[in-house]
Image (spheres, rainbow, N blue to C red):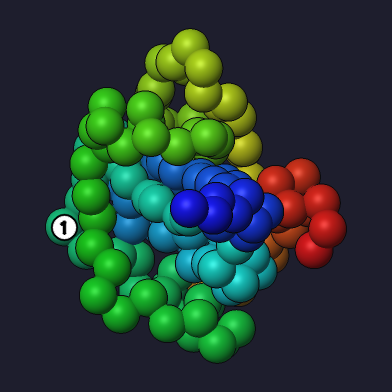
Amino acid sequence: MTHTAPTPESSEKKPSVLFVCSKNGGKSQLAAGLMRQLAGGSVDVYSAGTTPGKDLNPLAVESLTELGIDVTGEHPKPVTDGVIGGVDVVVVLGTEAKLEPRDGTRFELWVPDEPSDRGIDGMERMRLVRDDIKNRVQALVGELQPGR
C-alpha cells in the first residue's frame, strides 16, 4: 500500500475572520463583503452583531454594490460562542459592540473614522466609512495571506 503525503494546499487550513459590530447591518457587513472580495476566497469570512438589527443598512449595501460586491442574501446574525471559537481572528468594529476576548483567539478593535462627527452624512459618509474599513481589511489580508 502506497501512502502519499498531503499537499500543502490540502493540509493547510484557511484562515478565518469574524467581523462584529452592534447591529450587524453596516460596518461588520462592509468588512465581511470587502474581505470576501479582497481575499478572493482564501479566507473564511463571517459577520455578526452583539444586538442584531432587522435589516442591512441600505447605504452600506449600496456602497458595496459600487465596488461590485453583492451581499444579496446576507442578514443580521447574532454572535455565538461557536462562531467565535471557530475563527482565528475576531474584529470588533466600533465602540458600541461589547465583546470579551477569548483565550486562543486573536481579537482586534477597529474604530473606523466617523464622518458624521464632521457633519458628513448619507452616502458620502458611508463611502468614507467603507474606504476606511477597506484599508484595514487590505492590511489584514496581507497579514493572513503574506504571499498574496
In this view, which residue lies farthest toward the right?
147
The answer to whether residue 148 is left or right of residue 49 is: right
Residue type at mark 1 is Lys
State the count of labels: 1
The answer to whether residue 68 is left or right of residue 46 is: right
Q: Decide: few, some or many residues near mark 1? Use Cα within 10 Å; few <14, some 14-19, many ≥20.
A: few
Mark 1 highlights which residue?
A: 54
Q: Residue, x 70% and y 47% (percent of image)?
A: 144
Picture layout, residue 30 above or below residue 59: above
Picture layout, residue 128 above or below residue 112: below
Q: Please tell me in which quadrant of the rendered image residue 82 appears.
A: top left
**Regarding mark 1 in the picture, which secondary structure is present there?**
loop
Q: Quadrant of the C terminus?
A: bottom right
Front in this rendered view, residue 106 or 30: 106
* Residue 133 shows up from this direction: no
Image coordinates for residue 13, horizontal then vertical, percent: 54, 47
In this view, which residue lies farthest toward the left?
54
Image coordinates for residue 139, horizontal then vertical, percent: 77, 51
Q: Please tell me in which quadrant of the rendered image residue 98 appears.
A: top left
Q: Residue, x 48% and y 12% (percent of image)?
A: 103
Q: Residue, x 42% and y 82% (percent of image)?
A: 70
In this view, which residue lies farthest toward the top?
103
Q: Residue, x 51% and y 23% (percent of image)?
A: 105
In this view, which residue lies farthest toward the front?
1
Image coordinates for residue 118, horizontal then vertical, percent: 67, 52
The answer to whether residue 96 is left or right of residue 15 is: left
* Residue 83 shows up from this direction: yes
Image coordinates for residue 37, horizontal then vertical, percent: 58, 73
The answer to whether residue 67 is left or right of residue 18 is: right
Front in this rendered view, residue 125 or 93: 93
